C-alpha cells in the first residue's frame, strides 16, 4: 500500500461505518447477547449439578437422590432461605409400633345357635382380663357392619393396643350371610382403591370352624369349608398374620371330649400367642402353619396374585404395592398390541372366565332343608315352592274363628291357601319361622319350575292337608265342603315370593280361577316390585324405620339393603294408584318399637300406603330366634302394640297424613290403620269422604272380590278404590271391640270355651 492510500484509509473506514453502521451495531449486539446467554447457561448448569435444590417437605424423591450422592459443594450461606430436610425411613420392621396390649375381638356367625355358644365359651376364656390381654369383644357377623372391621382395623384406645381377630365359623352348604361376608373379604382384597392387605395393622387373627363330619366327612367333601375360606381371606387381608392354625371341630364328635375339647385346646394356643405378642414376641414363632412360606405360596396360587412379600425375619409380611395388571394380562396385552378396555365398575379380578355352575334345585329332596321343612309341616312343591295349612285354617274349619284377614278384609281362613313360590329369601329376619335352614340368596340361581307345575302342586298339597282334617273332632261339615274350593291365596308363608321369576304368570293363574291374592314382599327387590302385575293386595314388610335397626332385625344379605328398601318405598308410592298397598309392621320389643314411631311415620309419608297393619311378633321358639337373642320377652303385649299404634297415628297426623285406626284383631295382636281419604265413607253419602269422626261414618276395609275380578277381566286400568266393598268393616272388628266374629266360638288354647273377649284398649 502507498502513502496516498494510507492517507485515504480513515476516510474509507469512516465511509464504511456510515454506510454499514446499522448492520455492524446489530451484529455486535447479537454476538454479545449470544455470548452472555452461553455464559449464563453454563453457570446454571453448574448450579444444578453442585448446589442443593430447595425442597418442599413433601418432595421426598429428589431429596433422596441428593442424599445418596457424596456432597461436593460449598455449604449454603447462612443468609439463604431455610432448607427443609427429610428422608425416607429405612424399611425396618423393628420400627413398627410397639404392642403391649391385645384386644381379642371375636366374630361368630350362627343359624342354629351352636356357634354362638362356642363363641361365648371362647370369650369366657379371656375372662378375667389381664394387663396384656384385654376383655374380649363379641360380634355377631350378621349384625356387624363389615366396613367397621374389615376395611381397616378399628381404632384402639391406646396406640400400643392392637386388635386380634378370632372367628367361630360354622359351614353350610346353603346360601347364608357367610357368603356375603366372604364376598366382602374378597372384594376388599381386590378393591384397587384399597391396599391388598388393609388389615395388616391387626396383631393377628385365628379361625375356628365348626362342621359335621357325619354328612361332610372330609374337607374335600365340604367339612368346615366356610372356615377354610374365612381363614384364607384373612391371611390375604392381614398380610398373613395368622396367629394360630385354623382349628376345625366336628359337632358330631363324641370321643376325646368332643368339639368342646378341640375348641379349648385351640383357645389355649391362641391365648399363648396373644400373651407372647404383648411381650414383644413375633407372630407365629414356632407355631406350625402360622404363615410359613409353603402355605403362603398355596394361598397365592389360589388367586394367582402373589402380591405379598415375606419380610426379613419371616414373621411379618409386608404387602407389595398392588400391581396394575397381572403377569398373564400383561403378556396378553403385548400380544394384542391393542388397548384393553378397563372395567372400573368391578373390583373382581378379570382372570380366566369360569363357566357358571349348572343351576341346582333350591331345596333338593332329602336335603337337610327339605327334611327340616317337611318336619315343620310344609309340603315342598317342585324344587323351590311350598304350601302349608295355617292354624287359622284349621280353626275356621272347626268354627273357632278366622285370622285378622277375615276381620279386616273379609277372607274366611278355611278358604285360604298359604303358599310361597320361593322358599329362598334375601333376609334372615330374627323372627323368621323358617328355623334358619331355608336357602338364602341375593339372586335366583336355582332351577326354575314352570308356574303351572307350581300352581298345580300348591293346590294339590293344600287340598291333601285339608282332607286330612276330615276326621278331626269339631270340623264343621259345611266349612269342610267350602274349603275344597280355594278362594284366596296368601303368598306370604316364608321366603320371598317376588323372587320367583314367573310370579306374574302364577298370579294370573290364581286370578283366572277367581282366587284372590295377597302378596307379601320384603322390600329388597325393587326391580321385581316394579315389574309386579295385578295382585289383590300388595304388602311390603316394614320391619324397622331406620338402617341400623333394619340391619339388626332383618339381617339382610344385600349390602345395599337400605337403598333397596327406600327404592321400594318410592315404587310403592307410584303403585298406590294401581294396587291396594299395605305396610306390614312386625313389632319386636327391644328391636324395633321403642322411639321408632316417628321414623315409621316418615316411611308412610314417603310411600303413602293404603293401609298400615301393625302386628306384634309371634314367638316361634326356634334356636334361630334364640340365637338372635329373641325370647318371649320380645313379644309385645297387646296394650303395647295399641300404645304404639296410637303414637304412630299421632305422628302421621303431625305430618298432615289422615290415617285412622280402622280395625283390630286382638287375638292376633294386630291393628289396622287406614288412609281415611280412601277407605272411610261418611254416613250420608253427600258428605265429603274425609269427614269424621267415626260416628259420622264407617271404615270400608273389606274387599269386594267379585269387583276385583270384574275389573281385571275388563282389561281396563283400575285402582284400589274400584273394589272396596260396599259393606263397612264389621262393627265387632272396629277399634275397641276386639275383632272376633261373635258367630264363632271362642276357645282357649286347650279348646275350652271362653267368655266374651276383652276389648283391646
Ligand atoms: C343347612 C345346613 C348345612 C350344612 N352344611 C355343612 C357343610 O357343608 N359342611 C359342614 O362341615 N357342615 C355343615 N353343616 C353343619 C354345621 O356347620 C354345624 O351343624 C354347625 O354347628 C352349625 O352351626 P350353628 O348351629 O351355629 O348354625 C350344615 C348344617 C346345616 C343345618
Ligand atoms: S322376609 Fe319373611 S320369609 Fe324372609 S326372612 Fe323375613 S320373615 Fe322370613
Image (cartoon, grey):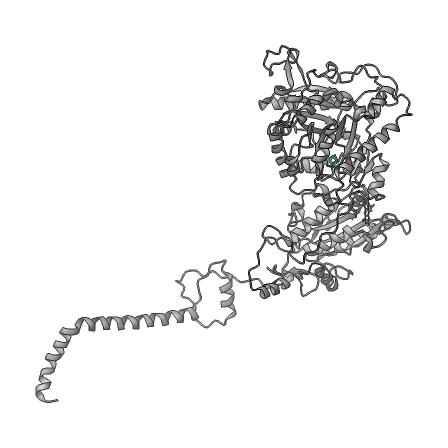
Please tell me which residue lies in front, 381 or 647: 381
Query: Is 238 situated above or below 741?
Result: below
The quarter of the picture showing ligand 2:
top right
Q: Residue furthest front?
A: 714
**Vertical side of 191 occupied by 450: above or below:** above
Q: Is residue 244 visible?
A: yes
- Locate the N terminus by quadrant: bottom left
> Which residue sits at x=69%, y=65%?
313
Picture coordinates of residue 376, whole percent (x, y): 84, 35
Q: Nearer the viewer, residue 74 or 499?
A: 499
Q: Image point 74% across, 54% down: which residue?
A: 231
Splitting the image into 4 quarters, where does residue 588 fall? top right
Residue 345 in the figure: left or right of residue 473: left
Judged left or right of residue 173, residue 303 is left
> In the depicted view, which residue is nearer to us: 601 or 687?
687
- Viewer-proximal residue among 494 and 706: 706
Q: Residue at x 83, y 41 (%)?
A: 370
Q: Residue furthest bottom?
A: 2
* Viewer can see residue 278: no
Residue 498 at what x, y percent from top left? 70, 36
Count of numbered tags: 0
Q: Quadrant of residue 146?
A: top right
Q: Height in image: 351 above or below 405?
A: below
Residue 515 image-quadrant placement: top right
Up-down relation of residue 656 to residue 79 (above or below)? above
Coordinates of residue 219 in the picture (x, y in percent):
82, 55
Amino acid at each position: 500500500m502507498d502513502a496516498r492510500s494510507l492517507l485515504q484509509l480513515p476516510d474509507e473506514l469512516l465511509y464504511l461505518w456510515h454506510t454499514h453502521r446499522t448492520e455492524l451495531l446489530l451484529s455486535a449486539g447479537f454476538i454479545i447477547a449470544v455470548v452472555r446467554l452461553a455464559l449464563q447457561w453454563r453457570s446454571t448448569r453448574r448450579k444444578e449439578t453442585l448446589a442443593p435444590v430447595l425442597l418442599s417437605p413433601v418432595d421426598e424423591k429428589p431429596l433422596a437422590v441428593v442424599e445418596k450422592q457424596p456432597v461436593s459443594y460449598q455449604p449454603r450461606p447462612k443468609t439463604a432461605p431455610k432448607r427443609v430436610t427429610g428422608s425416607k425411613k429405612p424399611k425396618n420392621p423393628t420400627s413398627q409400633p410397639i404392642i403391649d396390649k391385645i384386644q381379642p375381638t371375636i366374630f361368630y356367625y350362627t343359624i342354629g345357635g351352636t356357634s354362638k355358644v362356642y363363641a361365648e365359651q371362647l370369650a369366657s376364656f379371656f375372662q378375667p382380663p389381664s394387663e396384656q390381654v384385654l376383655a374380649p369383644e363379641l360380634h355377631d357377623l350378621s349384625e356387624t357392619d363389615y366396613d367397621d372391621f374389615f376395611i381397616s382395623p378399628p381404632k384402639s384406645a391406646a396406640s400400643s393396643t392392637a386388635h386380634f381377630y378370632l372367628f367361630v365359623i360354622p359351614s353350610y352348604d346353603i346360601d347364608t350371610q357367610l357368603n356375603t361376608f366372604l364376598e366382602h373379604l374378597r372384594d376388599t382384597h381386590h378393591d384397587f382403591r384399597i391396599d391388598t392387605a388393609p388389615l395388616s395393622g391387626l396383631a393377628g387373627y385365628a379361625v375356628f370352624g365348626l362342621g359335621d363330619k357325619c354328612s361332610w366327612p372330609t374337607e374335600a367333601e365340604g367339612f368346615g369349608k366356610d372356615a377354610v375360606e374365612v381363614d384364607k381371606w384373612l391371611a390375604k387381608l392381614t398380610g398373613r398374620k395368622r396367629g394360630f392354625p385354623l382349628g376345625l371341630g366336628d359337632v358330631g364328635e363324641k370321643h376325646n371330649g368332643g368339639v368342646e375339647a378341640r375348641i379349648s385346646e385351640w383357645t389355649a394356643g391362641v391365648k399363648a400367642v396373644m400373651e407372647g405378642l404383648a411381650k414383644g414376641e413375633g407372630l407365629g414363632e414356632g407355631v406350625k402353619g402360622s404363615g410359613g412360606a409353603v402355605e403362603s405360596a398355596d394361598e397365592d396360587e389360589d388367586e394367582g396374585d402373589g402380591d405379598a412379600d415375606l419380610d426379613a425375619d419371616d414373621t411379618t409380611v409386608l404387602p407389595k404395592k398392588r400391581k396394575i395388571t397381572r403377569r398373564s394380562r400383561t403378556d396378553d396385552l403385548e400380544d394384542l398390541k391393542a388397548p384393553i378396555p378397563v372395567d372400573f365398575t368391578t373390583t373382581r379380578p378379570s382372570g380366566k372366565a369360569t363357566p357358571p355352575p349348572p343351576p341346582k334345585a333350591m331345596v333338593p329332596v332329602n336335603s337337610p332343608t327339605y327334611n327340616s321343612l317337611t318336619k315343620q309341616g310344609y309340603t315342598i312343591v317342585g324344587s323351590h315352592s311350598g304350601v302349608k295349612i295355617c292354624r287359622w285354617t284349621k280353626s275356621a274349619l272347626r268354627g273357632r274363628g278366622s285370622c285378622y284377614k277375615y276381620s279386616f278384609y273379609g277372607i274366611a281362613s278355611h278358604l285360604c291357601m298359604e303358599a310361597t313360590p320361593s322358599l329362598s329369601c334375601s333376609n334372615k329376619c330374627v323372627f323368621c319361622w323358617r328355623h334358619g335352614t331355608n336357602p338364602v340368596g341375593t339372586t335366583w340361581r336355582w332351577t326354575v319350575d314352570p308356574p303351572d307345575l307350581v300352581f298345580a302342586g300348591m293346590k294339590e298339597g293344600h287340598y291333601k292337608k285339608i282332607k286330612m282334617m276330615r276326621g278331626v273332632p269339631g270340623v264343621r261339615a259345611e266349612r269342610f265342603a267350602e274349603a275344597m274350593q280355594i278362594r284366596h291365596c296368601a303368598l306370604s308363608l316364608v321366603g320371598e315370593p317376588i323372587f320367583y321369576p314367573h310370579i306374574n304368570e302364577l298370579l294370573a293363574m290364581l286370578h283366572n280361577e277367581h282366587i284372590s291374592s295377597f302378596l307379601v314382599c320384603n322390600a329388597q327387590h325393587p326391580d321385581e316390585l316394579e315389574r309386579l302385575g295385578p295382585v289383590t293386595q300388595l304388602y311390603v314388610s316394614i320391619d324397622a324405620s331406620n338402617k341400623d335397626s333394619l340391619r339388626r332385625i332383618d339381617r339382610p344379605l344385600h349390602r345395599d339393603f337400605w337403598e333397596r328398601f327406600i327404592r321400594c318405598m318410592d315404587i310403592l308410592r307410584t303403585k298406590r294408584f294401581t294396587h291396594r298397598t299395605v305396610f306390614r309392621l312386625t313389632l319386636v320389643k327391644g328391636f324395633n318399637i321403642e322411639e321408632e314411631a316417628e321414623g315409621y311415620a316418615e316411611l308412610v309419608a314417603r310411600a303413602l300406603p293404603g293401609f298400615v297393619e301393625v302386628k306384634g311378633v309371634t314367638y316361634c321358639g326356634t334356636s334361630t330366634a334364640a340365637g338372635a337373642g329373641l325370647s318371649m320377652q320380645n313379644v309385645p303385649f297387646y296394650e303395647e302394640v295399641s300404645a304404639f299404634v296410637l303414637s304412630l297415628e299421632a305422628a302421621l297426623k303431625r305430618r298432615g297424613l289422615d290415617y285412622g285406626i280402622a280395625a283390630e284383631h286382638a287375638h292376633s295382636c294386630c291393628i289396622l290403620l287406614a288412609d281415611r281419604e280412601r277407605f272411610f265413607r261418611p254416613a250420608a253419602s253427600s258428605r265429603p269422604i274425609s269427614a269424621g269422626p267415626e260416628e259420622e261414618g264407617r271404615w270400608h276395609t273389606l274387599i269386594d272380590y267379585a269387583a276385583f275380578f270384574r275389573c281385571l277381566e275388563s282389561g281396563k286400568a283400575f285402582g284400589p278404590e274400584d273394589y272396596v266393598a260396599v259393606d263397612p268393616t264389621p262393627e265387632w272388628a272396629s277399634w275397641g271391640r276386639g275383632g272376633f266374629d261373635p258367630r264363632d266360638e271362642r276357645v282357649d288354647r286347650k279348646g275350652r270355651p271362653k267368655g266374651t273377649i276383652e276389648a283391646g284398649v
